[in-house]
Image (cartoon, rainbow, N blue to C red):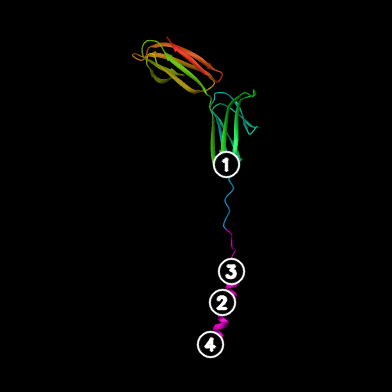
Amino acid sequence: MNLKNEKIRSTACIMIVLSVIVFSFIECKSPESTEEIVASIYVSNECGLKIDVYMDGAYKFTLEFLYYEIIENVSPGTYEIVAKKEGTGEVIVTEIVTITTSGETWVSILYSASINVVNQYGEPLNIYTNGNLQGELGDGENQVFTKVPYGEHVIEAAKASDNSFVASVTINVAEEKEYTWTIK
């Protein structure tokens, strides 16, 4: 019986030594830390002219109308995106962007000019901007088109009853203000 107990003890010791060796080869890892937050800011130009884009006062790029560019590898924080008329320094839009997670953030540079169309013609009119029907405008009513980009815009009026032409105007949006056209 002594021999049997000694054999069991010997086997147990070997098992313990082997367990220690096996566990020493297994790499223990601490819980993974949170991933670094890195984002991209997409800036799109919808204001009607070429712009210079700045982030926190630093020039980033020049952007054509209806194009976009990407500011990559942006860390968490709050940033000021400024769009200026190309080469003039005249500020068009200032946007504040806060980055808290990885991914994409979009900033659209829009212009805040508007066109107010006033119908004093005496009957309902169909209003068209740049060839696209915007809807019917009743007599004595007005309609304001907002976020109008820089450039020339043709506005036309036609009688709602038979869509016959009444009047048109071309408005050149060159600054941030409300333009008004009264149809008489």
If you read the primary sequence from the N terminus, does the residue marked by circle 3 or circle 2 appear first? 2
- Residue 85 versus residue 132: which sits nearer the camera? 85
Q: Outermost residue, left direction?
A: 161
If you read the primary sequence from the N terminus, does the residue marked by circle 1 or circle 2 appear first? 2
Numbered label attached to residue 39? 1
Numbered label attached to residue 4? 4
If you read the primary sequence from the N terminus, does the residue marked by circle 4 or circle 1 appear first? 4
The image shows residue 21 at horizontal and vertical percentages of: 60, 71
The image shows residue 90 at horizontal and vertical percentages of: 62, 23
Distance from disc 1 to disc 2, alpha carbons, whole Å, reads: 52 Å
Image quadrant assignment for residue 58: top right
Is residue 88 depicted above or below 81 in this figure? Answer: above
Is residue 75 depicted above or below 175 in this figure? Answer: below
Do callouts 3 and 2 mark residues in contact (Cβ within 8 Å)?
no
Numbered label attached to residue 15? 2
User: What amino acid is at disc 1?
Assistant: Ala
- Residue 2 versus residue 97: which sits nearer the camera? 97
If you read the primary sequence from the N terminus, does the residue marked by circle 2 or circle 4 appear first? 4
Numbered label attached to residue 23? 3
Numbered label attached to residue 69? none
Distance from disc 2 to disc 4, alpha carbons, whole Å, reads: 17 Å
Q: Is residue 12 magenta?
A: yes
The image shows residue 178 at horizontal and vertical percentages of: 51, 18
Image quadrant assignment for residue 104: top right
